[in-house]
Image (cartoon, rainbow, N blue to C red):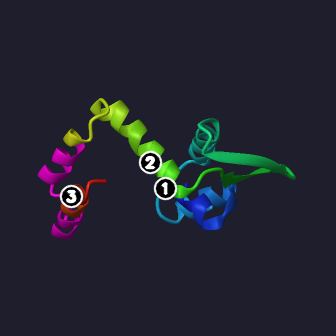
Amino acid sequence: MKLVWERQEATVREVYEDLLQRRRIAYTTVMTMMNVLERKGHLRKRAEGRSFVYRSVRPRRQVVRAMVKDFLDRVFGGSAEPLLVHLLEDKQLSERDLEAVARRIRKGR
């Protein structure tokens, strides 16, 4: 999704080539993920020659919110507390992150 947002529109090949610069990945994996994102309503595709061009249907914030909710539901039974505990215990949150979270909590969403 990040690469599609950056490009505005992208083919599977373009996303694949961008990802390949960062890590090894199979073309079919990228194609499958983009099709899954389309089925979930995050991407829309149109035919252009022999390829499909994908674009984001929803704003980034809305998609991220839906993905995080889906992750919390599947992995943590819908509760954010175990995720936060995990991040704290594994020291994945910097002091700056912790301060920002504390401010958000005090502010009340």
74 left or right of 2?
A: left
Q: Distance between the Cα atoms at labels 1 and 3? A: 22 Å
Q: Give the residue at mark 3.
A: 92
Q: Residue 107's image quarter?
A: bottom left
Residue shown at 31% from the left, 53% from the top: 109
Q: Give the residue at mark 1.
A: 61
Provide the major secondary structure of the magenta segment.
helix
Q: Position of residue 48 (x, y in %)?
A: 84, 53
Residue placed furthest toward the front: 107
Q: Are marks 1 and 3 in contact (CB under 8 Å)?
A: no
Does dot 2 land on a helix, a strand or a loop? helix
- Position of residue 70 relative to residue 19, above or below, is above
Q: Distance between the Cα atoms at labels 2 and 1? A: 6 Å
| Label located before the other in sequence (1 or 3) | 1
| Label located before the other in sequence (2 or 3) | 2
Q: Quadrant of the N terminus?
A: bottom right
- Which amino acid, by three-letter code, is at mark 3? Gln
Does dot 3 land on a helix, a strand or a loop? loop
Residue stretch in magenta: 83-100
Q: Give the residue at mark 2.
A: 65
Out of 11 and 100, give the one closest to the viewer: 100
- Position of residue 97 relative to residue 50, above or below, is below
